Amino acid sequence: MRQRPLVRAIRDAIALLRRKRRRRSALAVAAQASPALKALTAAAMALPGLGPAPSHAAPGDLGTFSYGHYTESARDLYGIKSAYKPIQVDSLFGSAHVTLADRWKLDFNFTQDTWGGATPMATAPLAWGGNQYGQTLTGATPYLALTSAYVDADLNPYGPYSSGTLNAIRKDTRLAHTLSTASPETRQQGDLHVTREWDDFALTAGAGASIENDYHSYFGDLGGRWDLNRKLTSLTLGLSYTNDSTYAQLDPGAFSYFSIDAYKNQIKNIPDPNSANVRHILEGTRQDWGTRLGLSQILTKDAFIETGLGFRRSTGYLGNPYKTVEFAFVDPSQTPDTTSLPGVSLYAATTGAVMEKRPEERNQWTWDMRYVQYVEPLDAALHLGYRFYSDDWGIDSHTFDVDWGQPLGGGWTVTPHFRYYSQSEADFYQPYFIYRQAAPLDPVSGKVNANRLPVDAYSSDQRLSGYGAVSGGVTVAKAIGKAITLEAAFEYYSHAGNLKLGGGGEPSYADFGYYQWNAGLKVDLSAPSLFDTGGDEHAHHHHHGGHGGHGGAPAGVMFGHMLHEAGQVMVGYRYMYNLQRGNMLHGSDKASDGQIVANGCGNIQCREASQDMSMHMHMLDLMYAPTDWLNLMLMPQFVSMEMTLRTLDGAPPPSGQHNHTRPTHTTGGVGDIGMYALVKLLDQPGHHVHAGIGISAPTGSVKEKMHGNDLIHYGMQLGSGTWDFKPSLTYLGDAGDWNWGAQLSGTKRLEDKNEVGFTFGDIFQSTAWGGYALTDWLNATVRGVYTLQGSIHGEYNQPHSETGPMDFPNSYGGHYWDVGFGLNANVSSGPFEGNNFAVEWLQPVEDHVNGYQQERRGALSATWSVAF
């Protein structure tokens, strides 16, 4: 059976992607306290994860963007190839540390993770899988269904069993995971912190949220820092609170096999309003309170040390609703089988699976210490760390890490790092549980009754087992000019039971590894902008639209401005969101469910249609002007989409085609990367024209799949899968407080089909706008947009769903009319001097769609940029 993993089932797998973003350092405090330590701080801050905490203000504002990819290795399935790919994660991170006013700082962090793939659901003896090991290991029911297995007098497992065939049964003590898989899922997290500083004290307050389909987390924290001994010593105290809610839909296919008795009161059986199915929802809440006391000390001009004690108390539902535990019971009153295998007495064991159950309280203690030494002869920094963890679940762990930050000259820094981790197992952990007693069966369901088990808490989650792990990698950074630093990192991690300190770890069946790589960009927001020329000329320059001195293009217009001085560099961020919701359309007319069922899916009847669909896109704008008439641009992007389906009125019952047991689908990851050149054609007072020539590279995946192995709907793929030509022609004008502009742009597919057999339609768009300067820094715009897009050519050449119009190529494209309302801010003074902000809402006016599509509700665009 296939089962969707909860975030917590792979949260440890992606924790390292986020750990380096969350670690806090007091090195910035050291730099402020002692000018002699600037060399130490500069070298040590290059180490991975060493960033300023909100209460430890950095000497200058900073913006950070990074993308990370994680791939896990396959599990040991004893030569059997799983049908499911291992877990893969794409992670996007952005942060800003800015000065709001004197002694006031603001920190903002945003993380988006999208993952999919197979994760362990349960563990049991390989022998009990019967002859069809392959099905068992990849999620078939023998590990979950109530069935019979065999053991000897010492409870060693035997199998496969076939009475009367001596060579068909054998002792086999190997263990194996049952794997489950899922459609991609996305988590978004954001937090905001504000810091107020005094001469010897700083106070930080913050809050945030982490949101995904089945798990919501809201948190807040308060922290303070007190500087002593002429700022050579610092004391820190932090308090935190987290409230989490689980809303997990249990897989209908698995629901009939495992026992839910332990959580029967928390599981709601909710009829699906869009189908005849019943949704089984487990609801749970938890609360976490935490505190940490820290001490940091500058030892010499070249050495720094910090240590801290932490405590965290968790209460409520602490389990994982997508994990099951295998139980086996051997009735001692039975007569053993002594004939099937000479010399061995075989006993029948009744097996069954139950949802895992963890204690509802957890108290956790930590002690950590970190030492940084600047090595002056090598102009490098050594970073040593140790962390001890203990909780009342029986887990003790040790973490050792070492980093070496080595500047190489020319703006290059290389930082190799190594980490070792070891933990003991939880008191209630076992790969599977076996007892000498009759099985406590429920007389109604016939399943194992979880309320009559010999133990109160139980889990076979390997993350609670005893194991060790080693990881190593390297980070390479390159400073470009005064304001920009590029970073790239790679790391490999190995998890194994035999790496545990003192031995006694989990057997090798649970071993696995993963690798991850990251690419990032840091921008020193306090570096002087090349636009900061001062005087009335500078103010007039911003008054009329920032880059180029003409009317600022609305946020939704791509390639709307140029840099006009050779050597200039611009870094920007662009966010786009659009939403489809409401009526289904055929052409410009509302389509009824009956029409869609009969005509929306070719020669078969449709079962489903979109209830709503949203898209989020995050894009970096990187621009460089090698001359005063040519700009080069690189625009990588990260995309996430979500579609919720509904069952059409009058739809036929499910057939052999894919049936959506979960109505919400999610995809996310790297999109197509754009590479462009903008060429100035005309530049005179009041008028400017430039042409754009661009290519979009097919870096976005077109092989995203749903629950199982069906390709997901065409419109939810992350890219086009083809090389695309993207030309544009832009005109900008201004006179006094008025400004205006127009643009023609398009997308021409350069290939007949992509690797999965189709090509998106070509696009042509025309737009024109007018703007008025409300103040010397704020401009308002109104624009109109016409878009024409062709339908999809070709179709999927791999298995895919065909349950609704979104699965058919002729229901894509059309022509559309929109009107946009925007604001552009070009800041010419104050703490945000040189920064440009813009926002625009695009409101649909009319849709004329190909085939059957859902009407559009609107699109939001927001941009930020700064030039140097």
Image (spheres, grey):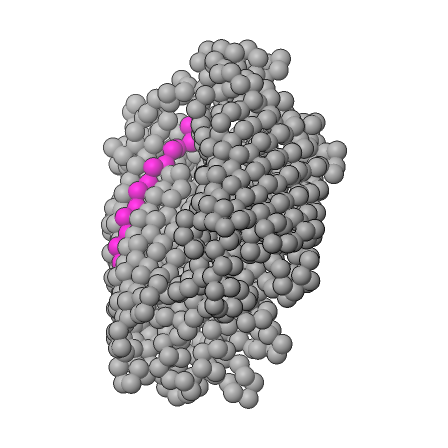
Residue drawn at the location 34% of the way across and 32% of the way down: 281
Q: Depth check: give the residue in front, 421 or 702.
A: 702
Residue drawn at the location 28% of the way across and 67% of the way down: 196
| Magenta stretch in the rendered image | 240-253
Q: Is most of the magenta stretch helix, strand or loop?
A: strand
Which corner quadrant of the image does residue 123 belong to? top left
Which corner quadrant of the image does residue 569 belong to? bottom right
Q: Position of residue 545 (x, y in %)?
A: 51, 53
State the residue lying farthest toward the front.
Answer: 736
Q: Is residue 248 magenta?
A: yes
Residue 179 is left or right of residue 687, and the answer is left
Q: Position of residue 310 (x, y in %)?
A: 28, 66
Give the vertical position of 583 relative to 172 (above or below): above
Q: Depth check: give the residue in front, 172 or 106.
A: 106
Which quadrant of the rendered structure holds the C terminus?
Answer: bottom right
Which corner quadrant of the image does residue 62 belong to? bottom left
Residue 452: tell me if it is visible. yes
Residue 342: tell me if it is visible. no
Give the vertical position of 741 relative to 602 (above or below): below
Residue 275 is left or right of residue 815, and the answer is left
Q: Depth check: give the residue in front, 816 or 122.
A: 816
Give the vertical position of 357 relative to 760 (above or below): below
Residue drawn at the location 43% of the way across and 24% of the way down: 582
Q: Is residue 287 magenta?
A: no
Q: Position of residue 72 (x, y in %)?
A: 55, 51
Residue drawn at the location 51% of the way across and 64% of the way down: 537
Residue 758 is left or right of residue 454, and the answer is right
Q: Position of residue 562 (x, y in %)?
A: 61, 54
